[in-house]
Image (spheres, coloured by chain):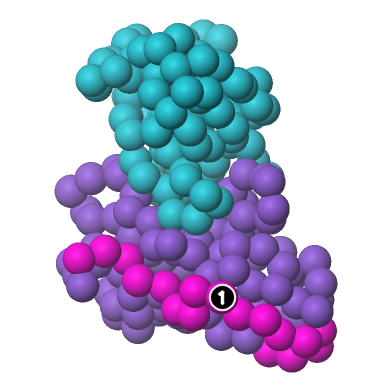
Amino acid sequence: SQQGEEDPQALSIQEGENATMNCSYKTSINNLQWYRQNSGRGLVHLILIRSNEREKHSGRLRVTLDTSKKSSSLLITASRAADTASYFCATEGTSGTYKYIFGTGTRLKVLA
Amino acid sequence: GAGVSQSPSNKVTEKGKDVELRCDPISGHTALYWYRQRLGQGLEFLIYFQGNSAPDKSGLPSDRFSAERTGESVSTLTIQRTQQEDSAVYLCASRPDSSEKLFFGSGTQLSVL
């Protein structure tokens, strides 16, 4: 079963705009990661946020985590056409098993 | 190699045949994961190997699915008596002990006709 649900399922924006996508999960977590997938094949790790962190930045990416609401958001600022991809959140539960469950993904399209 | 390698990249098979999918993880990565991704969907967890521990097989959808891993190297995912609903991209990922980050291969696109 899938842990994460992401919304929106699809997002279309103009180049230069910001893109925000959200991830909700069901059980307590140790950490949450965001991954990017181009063309339906391999995923690439973007950023990790731990359960005791509220916000993290990496370049044009900003991730927030609200453990009370069991949700996270990924913000991509000043988007580029090259950011067009699917974005997934992945959670690791608190059992310490390093088993990662992925969300349903958000398909982002950035129009030039 | 530098990254996770999966083979074949594409596999077309007939319903009822068995298939084997291979994953070569990054050298030194003790953990290895298999996921399934149906068209336009998220990733479904299938199985997870960690070193010499018993694998977590909780995501395997039926007894037609099995996987093996030799030590901390190659893994093979086997699907017996394939069905059309098995058509998907099968993704493999590995992870070193020192990190929570997963490194993915490019996947095997399986098409069952």
B30 part of magenta stretch: no
The residue shown at (75%, 77%) is B112
Q: Is residue B33 left or right of residue B36?
A: left
User: B112 or A12, which is in the foreground?
Assistant: A12
Disc 1 crowd, CA 10 A, few/some/many (<14, 14-19, 20+): few
Residue under label 1, please give it.
Answer: B10
The residue shown at (51%, 15%) is A14
User: B21 or A75, which is in the foreground?
Assistant: A75
Occupied quadrant, residue B81: bottom right
The residue shown at (55%, 28%) is A109
Q: Is residue B48 above or below residue A77?
A: below
Q: Is residue A67 above or below residue A27?
A: above
Q: Is residue B33 above or below residue A79?
A: below
Q: Which residues are magenta?
A: B2-18
Q: How far from the left and from the top, in percent, is residue B71?
A: 30, 80
Q: Identity of the amino acid at label 1?
A: Asn
Q: Is residue A40 visible?
A: yes
Drawn colour of chain B?
Answer: purple
Drawn colour of chain A?
Answer: cyan
Q: Chain of mark 1?
A: B
